[in-house]
Amino acid sequence: MKPPSRLQPAGLLGLLFLAPIVGAFAQDTSKLIPNPRILFSSTVRKADGGTTTYQHIAPPTAEQLAALAAAQQPAATAPSAPLPPLLNLTARVYEGSLTELRWVHQGIECRAWSSVDFRLLEAIPQFEQDGVTRRLSSITMTHRQPPAGVVLQRPWPQFPAEVLAAVPQGLRAWYVLMEFGGTAAMESEACAAVDALHRYVEVHWEALQARRTEREAQKAADAAYKLAHPEPPPPPTNTIIQFWKEGQP
């Protein structure tokens, strides 16, 4: 006795492909069996005005499956240039006080206190300083000073007076290394990228401050516009689902 046939959804090796189409004209044909022989078709209208069409098609040929696979292959791209080195760190901004920095160098954890409000560096993918370009990946979290009269479980972090007294006159971007698990010989290498970042901020201090002011104003304007002009609901979509029987009854 032959095993009963089973339905095979459209796609490579039995994957089910949904082909959403916008309106009634555009269709992502790369997800459908090309030029199928449709045995039966049924369309169901959805509540949003769109449709779902079920196409029972003849089992696709090897040529059709090959054409489907070729259509889904990503376009070949030219080899890209090597990426600049990456500085990956976490910044906890204590508003009006300091920023706690954490990063890892060759498996060694580093922690520092910085005078830079790292919200200045949001959405800056890379920076160039001293002739070297570095990518910047910073996770920034903001801690706001509580209102007067509110008692914190932990004291609000501040730079000690002796640290502030040692800062060169007029320097705005600086940091103090608080924890480093490596040897003294490794410290310079572990801090090289953070040193360069603080020099970059010092050189571009005014421009970064102006950029942040513009970004905050733009965020406020965008929020006001979205509130006054709510987006319309998305247009109804039409979906095609192809399936076929595998094997012979």
Image: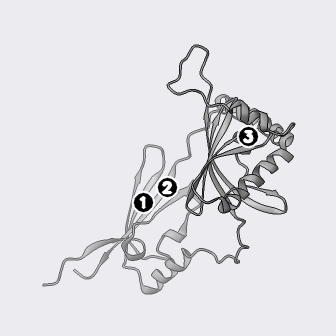
**Do tag 2 and tag 1 residues touch (Cβ < 8 Å)?**
yes
Q: Quadrant of the C terminus?
A: bottom left
The coloring applied to the image is one colour
Residue indicated by mark 2: 238
**Left or right: where 47 falls relative to 172:** left
Q: Residue sitting at 75 percent across and 36 percent down?
A: 218
**Left or right: where 135 falls relative to 204:** left
Q: Secondary structure at mark 2?
A: strand
Q: Secondary structure at mark 3?
A: loop
Q: Which mark is residue 53?
A: 1
Ranked by sequence position, the earlier of labels 3 and 2 is: 3
Task: Name the mark nearer the viewer: 1 or 3.
Answer: 3
User: In x, y percent, where is residue 67?
Assistant: 51, 81
Which picture quadrant has residue 156? top right
Tell which of 47 and 136 is nearer to you.
Answer: 136
Q: Secondary structure at mark 1?
A: strand
Separation of residues labelled 1 and 3 (CA atoms): 58 Å
Residue indicated by mark 3: 116
Bin the neighbour count of mark 1 within 10 Å (Cα to Cα): few under 14, some 14-19, many 20 and up: some
Q: Does residue 63 lie above or below 87 as drawn? A: below
Q: Does residue 37 lie above or below 216 as drawn? A: below
Q: Which mark is residue 158?
A: none
User: In x, y percent, where is residue 121?
Assistant: 73, 45
- Amino acid bearing label 2: Asn
Q: Quadrant of the N terminus?
A: bottom left
Bin the neighbour count of mark 3 within 10 Å (Cα to Cα): few under 14, some 14-19, many 20 and up: many
Ranked by sequence position, the earlier of labels 1 and 3 is: 1
Q: Residue sitting at 85 percent across and 42 percent down?
A: 207
Give the number of callouts.
3
- Amino acid bearing label 1: Thr
